[in-house]
Image (tube, helix red, strand yellow):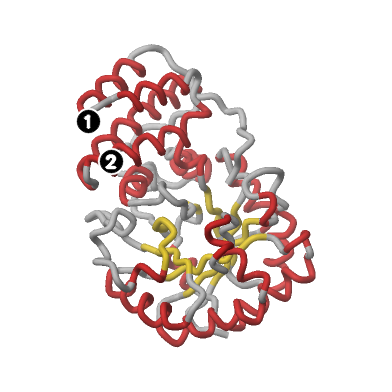
């Protein structure tokens, strides 16, 4: 057994974390969500999905996807990779950049990834997928993780063998999103498969899929015994969800919010969402060039607005704004009126 396997619990002292998401899991979102982590605790933090073919040729740290803030810690960049030569170049570079662990994507079902034999395509060739992890282990001493999906056609026997091979090849932990590639983000995630992998191997495992509320996160841990819960789009809309979890579990409030309780009512959550959007706008213009800031702000609001009553109106106002000041003014006007952040679940899940 790899002596480093204990590192997930050391890194994710607070066992809830953000999912790696293209266009979302960047420096601004990390800074936003970090404000709601219980004081004195930390978890692992992803990057957007990084293409190993580009990393070795890029000025890492300068690209929008690899920018860091002074507050960044426990970074676990996620990479698309399927060739040894790009592993050899990329992993040491990411380690020098400040990664504390490295995550190999074997779960992305998007056609662009599939056409180049990245992401979930690797699950179609188990021996090659396992070899990728073995090769990665040769080029870094950092902990390695693999994010994957359910087996093709929900073949549980296949999934068990695939996960066994990943662990044996040197993966320190796995993250399982138990949907098939065809499901993408639709339909129900089969949490029983997370429990099956954890019960079978009793090795570090993160659960992912269908976590939209703090109740969902606690339910996943209780039902599956996973070591941590990874949350995607719901954490974009409710970054204080981590504060809600901390409150329910008896952890400290976030630094600077001592003595306060997290927002729970629809009115309280809408006000907090407004503060989050304002922070996101200001930070985006601090870290990114104007064109990229506009793109990332509008994408963030399109992803996070479905829980907001009349959120489509905010999407429209932001898209028409031509400056940081105009965006902030529109946001201030919108949330200056009574708003509600509803608890219903959306059809698109992560």
SS type, badge 2: helix
Image quarter in which the N terminus is found? bottom right
> Along the polypeptide, which appears first: circle 1 or circle 2?
2
- Residue linked to disc 1: 324
Please tell me which residue lies in front, 225 or 325.
325
SS type, badge 1: helix
Residue in the image at 61% along x and 28% along y:
344
Give the answer, above or below, for where 271 lies relative to 347: above
Q: CA distance from mark 1 to mark 2?
A: 9 Å
Q: Residues within 10 Å of mark 2 (few under 14, many from 20)?
A: many
Q: Residue furthest front?
A: 115
Q: Residues within 10 Å of mark 1 (few under 14, many from 20)?
A: some
Residue in the image at 55% along x and 58% along y:
228
Give the answer, above or below, for where 260 lies relative to 56: above
Contact (Cβ within 8 Å) of mark 1 with mark 2 = yes
Give the answer, above or below, for where 3 lies relative to 41: below
328 relative to 15 in the view: left or right: left
Residue in the image at 39% along x and 47% along y:
38
Q: Residue furthest top?
A: 337
Of the numbered discs in the image, which one, if any, rests on residue 66?
none
Give the answer, above or below, for where 77 lies relative to 39: below
Where residue 235 appears, as percent x and y from the top left, is: 47, 42
63 relative to 302 in the view: left or right: left
Where residue 90 appears, as percent x and y from the top left, is: 37, 75
How many numbered callouts?
A: 2
- Residue linked to disc 2: 293
Please tell me which residue lies in front, 260 or 105.
105
Please tell me which residue lies in front, 240 or 252.
240
């Amino acid at each position: 057994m790899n002596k480093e396997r204990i590192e997930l619990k050391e890194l994710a002292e607070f066992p809830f974390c953000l999912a790696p998401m293209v266009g979302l899991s960047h420096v601004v979102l990390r800074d936003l969500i970090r404000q709601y982590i219980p004081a004195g605790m930390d978890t692992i933090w992803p990057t957007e999905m990084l293409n190993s073919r580009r990393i070795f040729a890029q000025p890492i740290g300068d690209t929008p996807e690899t920018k860091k803030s002074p507050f960044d810690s426990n970074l676990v960049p996620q990479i698309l990779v399927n060739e040894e030569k790009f592993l050899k170049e990329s992993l040491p570079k990411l380690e020098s950049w400040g990664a504390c662990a490295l995550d190999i994507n074997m779960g992305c079902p998007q056609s662009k990834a599939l056409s180049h034999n990245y992401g979930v395509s690797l699950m179609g060739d188990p021996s090659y997928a396992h070899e990728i992890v073995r090769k990665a282990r040769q080029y870094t001493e950092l902990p390695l993780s693999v994010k994957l999906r359910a087996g093709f056609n929900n073949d549980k026997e296949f999934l068990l063998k695939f996960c066994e091979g990943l662990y044996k090849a040197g993966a320190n932990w796995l993250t399982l999103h138990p949907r098939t590639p065809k499901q993408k983000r639709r339909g129900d995630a089969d949490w029983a498969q997370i429990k099956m992998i954890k019960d079978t191997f009793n090795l570090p495992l993160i659960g992912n899929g269908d976590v939209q509320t703090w109740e969902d996160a606690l339910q996943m841990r209780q039902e599956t015994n996973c070591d941590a819960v990874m949350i995607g789009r719901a954490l974009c809309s409710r970054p204080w969800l981590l504060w809600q979890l901390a409150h329910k579990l008896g952890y400290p409030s976030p630094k600077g919010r001592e003595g306060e309780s997290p927002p729970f009512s629809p009115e309280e959550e809408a006000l907090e969402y407004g503060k989050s959007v304002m922070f996101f706008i200001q930070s985006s213009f601090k870290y990114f060039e104007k064109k990229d800031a506009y793109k990332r702000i509008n994408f963030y609001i399109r992803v996070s607005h479905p829980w907001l009553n009349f959120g489509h109106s905010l999407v429209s106002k932001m898209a028409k704004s031509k400056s940081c000041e105009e965006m902030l003014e529109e946001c201030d006007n919108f949330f200056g009126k009574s708003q509600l952040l509803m608890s219903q679940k959306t059809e698109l899940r992560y």
